[in-house]
Amino acid sequence: MMPNVTDQRIDQLSVGAGPIPETFEASFRGQRDWRFWELMAFYFGCLGAGLYAISALLDWRAPGGAPRTTVTGLIVGFVLVIVIKNGSHVLGSSRPGRALRALSQVGSSWISRGSLFILLFGIFGALDVMVRLGWIPGDKDVLGWILGILALLASLAVMVYVGFVMAQGRRISLWHSPLMPVIFLVYSVVVGCALATGIFVIFGIAYDTELVRVLMLIGIPVMIFLVLAQLAFLGTSTEAGRISLRMLIRGRLAAPYIGGALIFGLVIPLILTAAAYGTSGGEAVASVISAVLIVIGGYLFFSSLLKAAVYTPTVEPGRSLLVNI
Amino acid sequence: MTKWGMTIDLRRCMGCQSCTMACKTKNGTPPGIFYRRVVEKEFGTFPNVHRTYVPMNCMHCDDPPCVAACPAGVFSKRPDGIVDVDSSKCYGARVCRIVCPYDAIAFIDEIVPYGEKGYLPPEKYWYEKFESGTAVKCDFCIDRLEEGLDPACVKTCPSEALKFGDLEDPDSEVSKLIRSRGGQTLNPELGTRPNVYYLT
């Protein structure tokens, strides 16, 4: 049975040092620990790491002797992760002076592992970009390949780790799913392709359009499948999961999630990309429109993911034996 | 080796929140911050409606998710079973609140006085040990344990619903109660192996 909890009521249920309660009712409450800065960090992390990975692939596929134009994508992706994502994490932490402690529990904490991945990405990514720009000798050499592969692996780890962090929240059915790391990986690749397309087309940078189009034609349907699978799992999960589901498909988040992220952010770009395949003239316009829709849709997707998270009460009917006394 | 644990008798608990107040008084926590509380739950349909009271605090799990998930090492599992917290290491990732299945960890966004006219003298003293932007939680009153005393909540409970003792000692009151009354842990399916047992 669907609990009688409105979305507005969920929003009003505060956490942490909020209003002093009259009673401590065991009730559903919305996740409000991670908000704007975490959203910025997660979103720009995916965007930057995805752009870096795609640009690295494009640069490798560039014919020998051709200008290394897609290095621009590497630099922008690197900056998004190292400056914007890291900056958002620091600004979002209440004690930024202790932020380096985030690296102290790599053996058990996914946030620590993620911090290590970002650090490694910063080191290998910077060296990789410098090698590709010719500032350090070794381009198209063993050293260049090793650095490029290490930076690519680090960027993939940066994409995925947030999914593992969120999947640890066992009381949040929306997040507690093995799909989360896959969702972050695939969405990062899709938004990375979109951002790369947008940047390269707008600034007239030559790139392998075929590779990007193929990646998008594979990545977007997979992402649509993952979004629908996540919604289907929510429907059969806990009551908190069903509240999240209702918020996403019928509540105030339906417009940004279903309309913005799913239809405008994935379905329409898929149709545009497929329709423009093999045509000339309208291809560039379709690519830019798709890119803009995907990048905006990605933001709405991650935003909805944080806002629709609902905690299962610690004492819930049907789950705890304690209510039967 | 001592392994501290607690039993909570739900037949005795009457929801008076004395334990909540004893905890706040002993620890001097700022407004809105509770290390423990008595959660109320209504269930059933009219006319067979019931209200149950479930005192909740940190379960001091044997496999605590907060210890594993915290990137800064704020939480640690002591040999005596207590999950200790060192807020001076906290930088505010808040993942502990996301992963704790028992909603046992509070986060001090900012320290504000209870009254509208500023801090009262005891508040100035109490709040010295807290930092805004850090996580805090129940530590079974470690300082009282070191003096041979029970935690403040156990000492205060007027209906003696709370008992505290060594779970490794088969002759301790808590061990006997768990055996005789069939003590249950909250949400055992999560595999966190709590050391707080409920008696029903």
Image (cartoon, coloured by chain):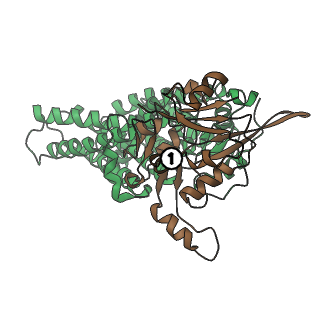
The residue wearing badge 1 is A296
The chain under label 1 reads A
Residue A288: % across, % down: 44, 44
Q: Quadrant of the N terminus of chain A?
A: top right
Q: According to the colouring, which chain is brown?
A: B
The amino acid marked with disc number 1 is Ile
Secondary structure of the residue carrying tag 1 is helix
- Residue at x 24% of width, y 31% of height: A61
Is A48 situated left or right of A246 in this image? left
Residue B66: % across, % down: 46, 39
Is A146 situated left or right of A114 in this image? left
The one of A287 and B71 positioned closer to us in this rendering:
B71
- Residue at x 52% of width, y 64% of height: B126
Pick out the residue farthest to the right: B47
Residue B32: % across, % down: 61, 57
Res A145 seen here: yes
Task: Residue A185: name its quadrant.
Answer: top left
- Residue at x 58% of width, y 26% of height: B188
Residue B128: % across, % down: 46, 65
Q: According to the colouring, which chain is green?
A: A
